[in-house]
Image (tube, coloured by chain):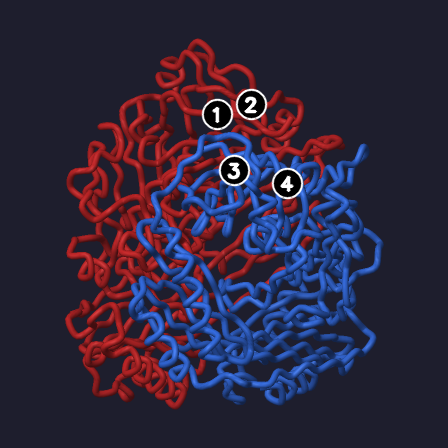
Chain colours: A blue, B red
Amino acid sequence: MQDYFYNLADFINSKLQSEEVYLCELIGEQSDFVRFNQGSIRQAGKVEQYYLKIELIKGQYHATGELTLGLATEIDQQRITALLTELREKRSHLPADPYLLYATEKQSTESIGKNQLPDAEEMITDILPTIKNHDFVGIYAAGGMFTGFANSFGQRNWHSSYPFNIDWSIYHNTDKAVKSAYAGFDWKATTFQDKITQSVAQLEILKRKPHTIKPGKYKVYLSPSAVHEILLLLSWNGFGLKAQRTKDSSLLRMLTEPRQNLSTKITLLENTTEGIAPAFQSQGFIKPPQVTFISAGRYDSALVSPRSAKEYQVNTNGGNEEEIPLSFDLLAGQLAVKEVLKTLDTGVYVNNLWYLNYSDRVACRMTGMTRFATFWVENGEIVAPLNVMRFDETLYQLLGDKLVDLTTEREFIMDTDSYERRSNRCANLPGALVEDFTFTL
Amino acid sequence: MQDLIKQRFYKIIPKVDFCSLRYVAEHSEKLVIRQNVMEPPVTKKDIGVMITVFDQGGAGYAATSDLTESGLRRAVKQAQSWAICSRKQSIVDFSKIAMPQIQGHYQSQVEKPWQTVPITDKIELLQNESKQCKINDKIAAWQASLWSVQTEQLYLTSDGGEISQQHEYLMPEIRVTANQGIETQYRTLGEFTTGRQGGLEVLEQIKFIGKGKQLAEEALQLLAAPNCPAKKLDLLLAPDQMMLQIHESIGHPLELDRIIGDERNYAGTSFVTLDMFGNYQYGSPWLNVSFDPSMTEQLASYGFDDEGLPAKKVFVIREGILETPLGGHISQTRAGLSGVANSRANNWNRPPIDRMANLNVEAGQSSLQEMISSIEAGILMQTNISWSIDDSRNKFQFGCERGQLIENGELTTVVKNPNYRGISATFWRNLSKVGNKDTFQIMGVPYCGKGEPNQVIRVGHASPACVFSNIDVFGGAV
């Protein structure tokens, strides 16, 4: 695939006209997807998709097009030639772009993943006997993921990986279920079996009579998965320079005097080095190893795309077009996981949050639901599953004044999203113990 | 291209119980003027096929963008391989599913096709609108955009089914942000929710021209407005919020694949159970809801779903009573209930699942003035800005861009950050008035997310304004 892409890049180069520059990016995958319901297969199939984006530039004028590759050289070259003609014609009608910025210094890189995945059907053969006696519902996704960049300055970047990600719930009844996942690059059937055994053990607690609490303020423990949901909401316009300069950021109150801060226990980074996403972006810039968003509770830096860099006259740090983090890293705290229940004492143990959104974006007040295995805890012991509750709380409370501590152990979470393509986002996160967390419904 | 695909498909049909090919070609273009500067326009040309095979009780699919005969043959083998793997391991016995075998054609009604208008005219139109937005230094950001999508689909089955469909959509948007200190307020056309099937004539239908200035004025008004009060009030929802209310608390809970459990790991389950159809009081007697793929302007109007079922209007709730689930052919067979033609995929690379398509509240009798006059203490809310609902689609909290109090039968103070919360199972029973045809508007959601693997799809929601009694409303953080 890498050679095929580089050959297409050379082909584009050969078709350039005087003073033209091109940038191109390939994003592709060979994915097996198997959906399960009630411990059986619901839908199973394979998807092979390869998208090529070409940006054709002349001076400050440019136009961008994206096409599907069929991986047949002659057909793909015909499609590229037609697209270049179309982009050239379109570009002639467009105004000059004052914010156009792309890398001109050649920085080629290569990160080639090793394919250790067994055949997909073999993995399913491992999975089915383990799940068949449970109300197991979820998705298996696995296979190669490819990202490439090339430009007319001879820069070539390649990133390939071969991950698997099984994301599941095992249900007791109605909405009472244990959620878990197994992701990585080196499939071990025994590890999957162990995880299912753990899920089934947790399911025993869900068989107890559910507890219902009244709206009000409670002490809660948010698992790393629950913290992840909060950070995913924040990533929507929270950390990008454009959102900050246009007063659209949910962290506006951390940026505007008198500034509001989070707890000094909060240090949050984009940690590209420890992530699974490519270290290059669509205009050819190489990302720094880390970008610190929040340092000891105070706002530090934003993600800056090349376009924002030009518009606001700052340096880019390799932010993607949307200025969305891909590799969250929240530093650990001092609370040992084995001490969580004892320290929580009486309150709510939240394994998962769901469907978060802002009830007041610039105040960073957010709402959402508890989901899956959420428990009522008394005197440091899990008493019963909790019926779902809605919360409504500001970030400045839950990761600020009311944060008791973060856990010392962290969990590495590989995102399961597959909108348009399988995600390469990940996060390394602790759990959080929070006081006076507001449940409203 | 379609003829070539057809010839190749008929050459490669394997000896199996059923095989289909679904070809999708999508061409899209988005033009954005942000703060009077053009953003880089992107043209996308996406093309590919999905092969589906049913054989001896198993089923498998394979999606590929390699449309050569050898590419299609490889996809058939991959689909067959998954069909064999899932045989006797599948939740559905596909040997008992007889798929529709239909011939037909559907095409969007388009007066001014996107491609027939020069790009320079479209840029000028957006520039003019953008320049109207910056009416004050407190306008911190603004943009105007047009997003056009044209699709061609061909669905072929091994037993002679052949359906072709062509759609064109236009999704316009204007967004204005006003800021002062730590306060930011927004007014939008609804984040692409005014999108419709059609060409540039959609702009006239939604009165796009001049909206930029109006939205900027309203954003400034909100910046100076008091917070929405926290109390129980009668709630008058405009169609651009009814759309979201219908989507989240009627559409999703009635999707049959959620009810029978397929979505429990991701999009969620439903508080609705199979035994409720035909008898459950979903809402007040004024609530009439239809699945209606026949309203040509709506985003999800079509002739056939992606498993070849002909689409027609069906009432899902009539006079408040739940009648019909939103489930396609396979889900109907699994559940033993009749449903609608809503098995849809968002593209060639995702398999069809149950989708709500166009789901509309039928117009009632009340004029807008009659509804306002009837409210002693209430609030009008417009344009969705925030949405959150539990995985059973019951406990919800929604927010709007703009609120206006109703006191003693009159619209009074504009308020910012209006939110409300409730429970689907009881909320619709508080429906006390349904607006007439003059209040009825066509809206839609271009990004409805669901499914594993995930897919976003276009759905349509048309609705009149409606009044709900005694609802818990509240404002933003102090």
Label 4 and label 2 in one chain? no
How far from the left and from the top, in percent, is residue B66? Answer: 44, 83
Which residue occupies the foreground of this view, B262 or B312? Answer: B262
Q: Amino acid at mark 3?
A: Phe
Residue B80 found in image quarter: bottom left
Crowd band around label 2 with a 10 angstrom C-alpha radius: few (<14), some (14–19), many (20+): many
Q: Give the label on residue B440, or none.
A: none
The residue labelled by disc 3 is: A391
On residue A398, the disc is 4
Please state which of residues B171 and A387 is positioned toward the viewer in this rendering: A387
The chain holding disc 2 is B
User: Of A9 and A143, which appears nearest the observer?
Assistant: A143
Q: Is residue B176 above or below residue B264?
A: above
Alpha carbon distance from label 3 to label 2: 19 Å
- Front position among marks 1 and 3: 3
Report the mark closest to the observer, 3 or 2. Answer: 3
> Badge 2 is on which residue?
B228
Q: Label 3 is found on which chain of the structure? A: A
B87 up-or-down from B328: above or below: below
Query: What's the chain of the residue with tag 1?
Result: B
Of the residues shown, which amino acid type is indicated by label 2?
Answer: Cys
**CA distance for labels 4 and 1:** 23 Å
Task: Using the rendered view, name the quadrant where residue B128 is placed.
Answer: top right
Left or right, residue A392 beside residue A371:
right
Question: Going from the N terminus, do you reach mark 4 or mark 3 first?
Answer: 3
Q: Helix, strand or loop at disc 4? A: helix
Q: Residues within 10 Å of mark 3 (few under 14, many from 20)?
A: many
Q: Position of residue B81 (x, y in %)?
A: 32, 84
Which of the image's four quarters has the C terminus of chain A? top left
Of the image marks 2 and 1, the number of the one nearer the N terminus: 2
